[in-house]
């Protein structure tokens, strides 16, 4: 249909409150991934170092659980807006094992679309009356998208600020956190460890400084995204706001978000969850009942089985640690790019600013497209601008032909 007949927008959607924000907030990872799909359609080989999805198949136990649910009509028809009770019990048991923290199942809410819908709903509920949200930079684009959506709905009374992660050291710039934190207006602080895209592991000292700052906030709530908490390298202790000493230090409410898609290898099955304070239980369930009805039933039964496979999770973390070491050693000799080693998670970052300048690329998206076009097999990488790291590329540790992909990147960047 022509625009003259439709006339959906008075001018252009980019001029709407939502369009002003989201037209320029494109997740360019999908631009690269779509280009790789075109190559595949032409029977050309590709290596996706874009998506953070395990290259290992679902375990027989997980597949059996989902198949059994599929064959059982009561399981198929079950509707739990807050998530299947058996899954929430299993999540509680897992967190007791890992963090020695016991959660009542009523405080555990399973998201309808992984953690994406949870962040959207939580941001709307907490910030509908205005206030400041503090996000990590570089950081996962989902946080930015949720904040921008609330800002589009609520206008100037929503303020989005950032604290910086030093990509040379993988340490949080605590001064930037303190300087940008608004004691009167802050409503949400998001922390993510290990981080996406940098793989930074927040230290106990960093947490203490953050918590001491947040404690002064009048209405602050800290959201700790722990989706990569079971993929930590070099046998390091995983600090969390759930650690006893840190938890006792924290005087403000907190929310834990987690997901089955990464360390539990259930990518695309969209099972995320949050541990929330009592005050959020009723409004969050109300949101889910009205906007998404129920999380996906079959996936939840698979998640129950996945949460019982601690050894499987450990082997994945070990595999990604070895890949991270290989990449660091292979790319160490390059002169125009700098690899930023990861401390955990599914990704690491390559700083390509000097290479982009030297070879006259417009930006990291153009570089990523050129890499995909020039390599054989075609190697896909994610522009760092998606995460607030312009001039960088995010590399996923998850593709099956990871070492081949790194070898091809080393050859590409070694060009004069």
Image (cartoon, rainbow, N blue to C red):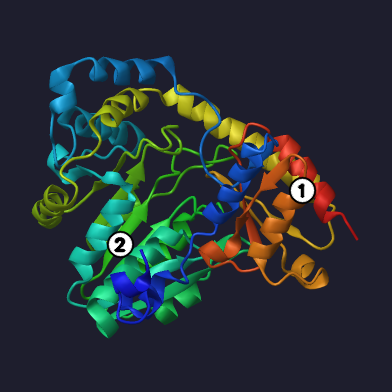
Q: Nearer the viewer, residue 276 or 283?
A: 283
Q: Quick one: SS at disc 2?
A: strand
Q: Position of residue 165 (x, y in %)?
A: 54, 66
* Number of callouts: 2
Q: Position of residue 46 (x, y in %)?
A: 67, 39
Q: Position of residue 279 (x, y in %)?
A: 11, 57
Please name which of the two marks, 1 or 2, marks the residue nearer to the observer: 1
Residue 173 vertical placement versus 400 (above, below) = below
Q: Is residue 175 left or right of residue 259?
A: right
Residue, far bottom: 156
Q: Position of residue 239 (x, y in %)?
A: 43, 49
Crowdedness of circle 2 by 10 Å Cα count: few (<14), some, many (20+)?
many
Name the residue tied to disc 2.
222
Q: Is residue 343 at least partly visible in the picture?
A: no
Crowdedness of circle 1 by 10 Å Cα count: few (<14), some, many (20+)?
some
Quarter containing the C terminus: bottom right
Instruction: Give the image quarter of residue 318.
Output: top right
């Amino acid at each position: 249909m022509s625009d003259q007949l439709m006339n959906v927008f008075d001018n252009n959607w980019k001029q709407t409150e939502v369009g002003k924000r989201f037209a320029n907030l494109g997740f360019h990872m999908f631009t690269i991934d779509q280009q790789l799909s075109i190559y595949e359609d032409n029977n050309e080989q590709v290596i996706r170092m874009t998506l953070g999805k395990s290259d290992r198949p679902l375990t027989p136990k997980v597949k059996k659980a989902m198949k059994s649910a599929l064959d059982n009509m009561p399981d198929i028809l079950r509707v739990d807006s807050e998530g299947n009770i058996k899954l929430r019990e299993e999540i509680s048991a897992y967190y007791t094992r890992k963090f020695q923290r016991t959660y009542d199942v009523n405080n555990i809410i399973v998201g309808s679309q992984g953690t994406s819908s949870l962040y959207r709903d939580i941001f709307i509920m907490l910030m509908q009356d205005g206030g400041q949200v503090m996000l990590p930079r570089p950081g996962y684009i989902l946080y930015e998208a949720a904040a921008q959506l609330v800002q589009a709905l609520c206008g100037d009374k929503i303020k989005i600020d950032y604290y910086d992660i030093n990509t040379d050291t993988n340490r949080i710039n605590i001064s930037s956190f303190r300087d940008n934190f608004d004691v009167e207006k802050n409503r949400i602080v998001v922390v993510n460890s290990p981080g996406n895209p940098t793989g930074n592991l927040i230290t106990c000292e960093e947490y203490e400084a953050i918590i001491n700052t947040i404690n002064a906030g009048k209405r602050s709530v800290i959201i700790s995204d722990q989706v990569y908490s079971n993929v930590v390298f070099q046998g390091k202790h995983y600090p969390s706001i759930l650690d006893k000493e840190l938890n006792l230090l924290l005087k403000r409410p907190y929310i834990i978000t987690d997901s089955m898609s990464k360390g539990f290898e259930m990518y695309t099955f969209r099972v995320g969850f949050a541990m929330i304070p009592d005050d959020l239980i009723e409004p969050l369930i109300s949101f889910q009942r009205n906007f998404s009805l129920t999380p996906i039933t079959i996936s939840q039964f698979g998640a129950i089985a996945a949460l019982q496979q601690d050894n499987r999770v450990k082997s994945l973390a070990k595999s990604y640690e070895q890949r991270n070491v290989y990449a660091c050693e292979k790319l160490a000799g390059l002169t125009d790019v700098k690899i930023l080693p990861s401390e955990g998670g599914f990704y690491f970052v390559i700083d390509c600013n000097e290479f982009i300048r030297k070879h006259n690329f417009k930006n990291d998206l153009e570089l990523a497209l050129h890499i995909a076009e020039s390599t054989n097999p075609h190697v896909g990488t994610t522009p760092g601008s998606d995460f607030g790291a312009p001039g960088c590329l995010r590399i996923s540790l998850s593709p099956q032909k990871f070492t081949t992909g790194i070898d091809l990147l080393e050859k590409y960047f070694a060009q004069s």
